[in-house]
Image (spheres, rainbow, N blue to C red):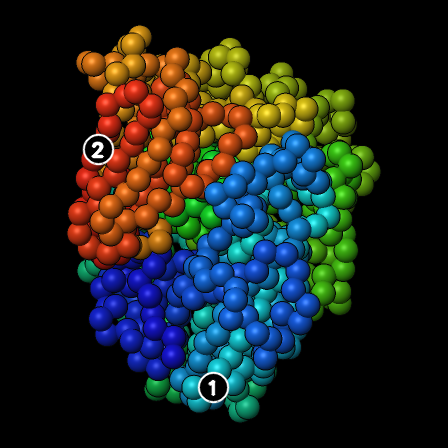
Amino acid sequence: MIALSTKRGTAWQALAAAAALALVIAPVSVLPGTTGTAAASTSAANRYRTVTDFDPGWLFNYGDASGANGASYNDAAWRKLSVPHDWSIEGKSPPASPFSQSAPSTGRGGYLPSGIGWYRKHFSLTVPATRKVYLEFDGVMANASVYVNGTLIGTHPYGYTSFRYDITAAAKFGGADNVVAVKTDTSAQPASRYYAGAGIYRDVRLIATDPVHVDQWATHVTTPNATGSAATVHAETTVVNNGGAAASVSVQGVLSDPGGAAMPAVTTAAKTIAAGASATFAYDVPVSNPKLWDLANPNLYSLATTVLAGDAAVDDDITPVGIRTLTFAASTGMSLNGKSVKFQGVALHQDAHGLGMAAPQRAVQRRLAQLKALGVNAIRTAHDPPSPVFLELTDRMGFLVLDEFFDVWTQHKYADVGDYATYFNRTASSPTGTPAVPGATGSVPWYQVDATSVVLRDRNHPSVAMWSTGNEIRDSLATRTPLLTRMVSIAHALDPGRPVTQALFRPADSGDVTGATRTTVDVFGGNYRPDEVIRAMKMSPARPGLFTEMGTDTSAWTTVKNTPGVTGLFVWTGAAYLGEADGLWPRGESDFGLLDGVGTVRPIGYSWQRAWGAPATSPPPTGTTASQVVLTPDHSTVSTDLDDVSYVKATVADSSGRVVTGSSAAITFSISGPGVLVAVDSGSPAQETFRGSVRKAYQGAAYALVRATGAGTVTVTASAGGLRLGTTTLTGTTAPFVPCSGSCD
């Protein structure tokens, strides 16, 4: 029997975890299409569909394993773990270093390992056999092949998009043993220009619904023309009837405010849905004096949509709602709730340094909070779709997001045989794990499937401001134009209210300024060529512009401030990232970032902070003669929740506690009490294992990343030769991790 875990720490799940014992006992649910993290401060939860956290209880094998897809395969010797899991960052034999100068991933992939990894999980179903059962993956890197009880359910090549498979026909009900097996394959290398990880590195959930239910990512909520005095929440949802007979169906919506107070229900007229068919329902919820979502006050409502078959409630869908108006104009740029605002943005890759791609939500929250303290208000997800967890945080913390689809289209940027160009135009295999591509008939290429899934999954997030179809695409203009036109049409069909841009490469040289690109995109975006962006903006018909990627030349920051039609910029980058290090061995990363890999502010970060008017901070005072190790946890309480982690900083300090930045002393960490070392880390760009208990200080500091294994006092100790020992304590708790809101962490 599957117990409902409170992992993905949540206000919603935690509220009723005590009553949520198994699939059969109406568990408190997570958001459909997201993780279990509460996307609003309300206590709303599913009552009719069951959504079970499927992250715990997996078995893992490094390398290929013949027959591992089979139900009867002997997996007793496999490693036990929970997902999300990135096997590349830890390597084959942690704590041994996973880095290799001869790694097929090359320096572009951070000199880290690639290949095949297998995951298996045993589970039982106690729901009625009349239910539909789905497995939903937020992201698997890469080329995922999913089997249930030995039957191949589907394959999914792109590691950054989510997918959901119907496993009803392959599953065994009545408490019998089921086995899901997932093969991940990153063998084709190089596969990226930066570190991409490997494995089931995002969340997984098991969903059981009535045959009559809200379809995948089918609820769409908009708040057109919202003001501080009145707003209308407009909702549309598609209900599918997978039963054997026609059903009379209506939909009821209940909106709850940020404090959890429910407004009067709105119920649609009934429609008859034939077996195997679907129908779309629309309704409006009026809101007086709404609490608007903005960067300073990211207020979140919650919409509970209940499906009624006859008079019986059979399914429900929970959707976070941010009431806000975001507009774009050629003359005035971007406005949020009627006030001019600029993207004070950074591009951000998805790895979290020593945690790789499978970062706990607390680690992501910490990085976002550090960037917000520097005056950053926007994130470009360079150069791939983010996780649902990431967007839940940007919703809650008050960021704007440029949600980007791809780094490449049909042409490789290098000889990267494993990158997305391999799959972009390849016909998608069925089932795709995603809803139908709008306007498509017959077979479709993977790029249309993936663009559809990104927009459908992410369109309800108030933090998502704009879509980007790609980054510095090297295809010819003749090749690009019909592809861009198709992607823009998909985005507009599924989400008419958001503009589409593209991070263009040398737009004047490539024909984009005077060609079809300029009028195909809604906002003209370009990398490192601000003058060309401004030139394109001024042509008729005029377009707002965006500096989608810029370096650290502060003159561009001034141009953004002084040019009304420029909506903002995204600097390269917000934080250091693994990879893009060809020829830099023994370094595994380059020098970009306002922050280093563990969050230390670099000089350019302080320049950014001053330029955008954030409250000024300064580097800590420095010393010269090391005498001690000082331990400082960034959070004194840490949970057993796998989404929580405390960053315990070990500073090599002088007798007054000032950091000795010239020290690279090897620091050995140890833990007593109910805690465990998740990773060790520092801001060093040089390759060095992130596992084990030893890490060299970089500029006088290293980190122990600690999680609780139970309630009680966790003691962390750090030693370095000849220096006084450092000790600190944390309070371990079994309470679920709850993400913060606003300027937090």
Q: Depth check: 168 or 688 in front?
A: 688
Q: Is residue 546 visible?
A: no
Q: Amino acid at mark 2?
A: Thr
**For residue 397, above or below residue 377:** below
Q: Where does the image place residue 554, in percent across and percent down from the top left?
A: 49, 12
Q: Where does the image place residue 533, in percent across and percent down from the top left?
A: 62, 23
Q: Amino acid at mark 1?
A: Ala
**C-alpha span from label 1 to label 2:** 49 Å
Q: Depth check: 609 or 197 in front?
A: 197
Q: Quadrant of the C terminus?
A: top left
Q: Quadrant of the N terminus?
A: bottom left
Q: Residue at x 46, y 38 (%)?
A: 690
What SS does tag 2 mark? strand
Q: Which mark is residue 176?
A: 1
Dot 1, crowdedness within 10 Å: few (<14), some or many (≥20)? few
Q: Residue at x 22, y 49 (%)?
A: 673
Quickly name the residue at label 2: 727
**For residue 703, above or below residue 187:** above
Q: Using residue 676 as the reference point, say whether residue 35 is left or right of it.
A: right
Point out the tag, 1 or 2, that comes first from the N-terminus: 1
**For residue 474, above or below residue 460:** above
Dot 2, crowdedness within 10 Å: few (<14), some or many (≥20)? some
**For residue 324, above or below residue 659:** below
Q: How many marks?
A: 2
Q: Where does the image place residue 357, in percent across and percent down from the top left?
A: 50, 45
Q: Residue at x 28, y 43 (%)?
A: 671
